[in-house]
Amino acid sequence: MKLNLVERGVLDPLAESSQESIFINDIPSPIHHISLFDNTKPGANIILNIIKASLKSIEVIESKKPAGAGANKFQLEKAAEGDVSILALGDCGSCTTWVILDAIRLEKKGVPTLSICSHKFAPFARKLAKAHGAPDLRIFEIEHPVAGLNPDKVKEKTDVMIPEIKKIFYKSD
């Protein structure tokens, strides 16, 4: 078999910077309600349930949306009921894209967000946020992969993030 190799340039679809600058809302203190925005990716519910268990003094509002798609108006409004919204999980191209874009939509509504993406997709998530005018969007990294792991492995990876999440949410305690 003969193989011809041709070097090609690849066009990056993300702009260097946005014309618009998105204000990133401060995390309020104290926090009374937190929304957990589950994009139904395998492992996202485990991550969010572990976070929920670690934030015992904060009332939780749960919202779900399909993976790989943007939230509809109702789903976004439900997620916006919290003082803060945690979105999970960005661990592939389309899911990461929509976690970030939904987080930006919530920030525009005045809701501070924390987006959870796997460490393999976090650089893309940051670049996407910057391209949409939100370079300071809060993005937490969880070790890749998450999908396909048993719950104990997902818990192990999530537990690494919990102290930092608590530090943000209990900053005045």
Image (spheres, grey):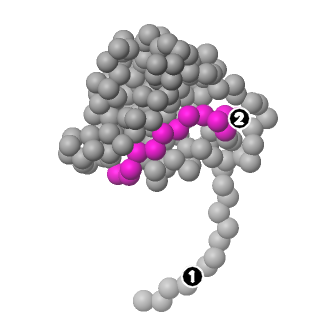
* Residue for point 60% across, 28% down: 104
Return the residue nearer the eye: 14 or 110: 110
* Farthest residue, direction right: 19
* Farthest residue, direction bottom: 2
Q: Which residues, given as a range, are shown in magenta? A: 132-145
Query: Taking 157 as reference, is 20 above or below it?
Result: above
* Residue for point 35% across, 22% down: 55
Q: Main secondary structure of the magenta part?
A: loop
Instruction: Name the residue carrying label 2.
Output: 133
* Residue for point 27% across, 44% down: 156
- Res 133 quadrant in image: top right
Query: Taking 4 as reference, is 155 above or below it?
Result: above
Instruction: Name the residue carrying label 1.
Output: 5
* Residue for point 60% across, 34% down: 137
**N-term-proximal mark, 1 vs 2:** 1
Is residue 140 within the magenta segment?
A: yes
Q: Position of residue 3 (x, y in %)?
A: 50, 85
12 to the left or right of 43: right
Q: Secondary structure at mark 1?
A: loop
Looking at the picture, which amino acid does disc 1 mark?
Answer: Leu
Disc 1 to disc 2, C-alpha distance: 38 Å
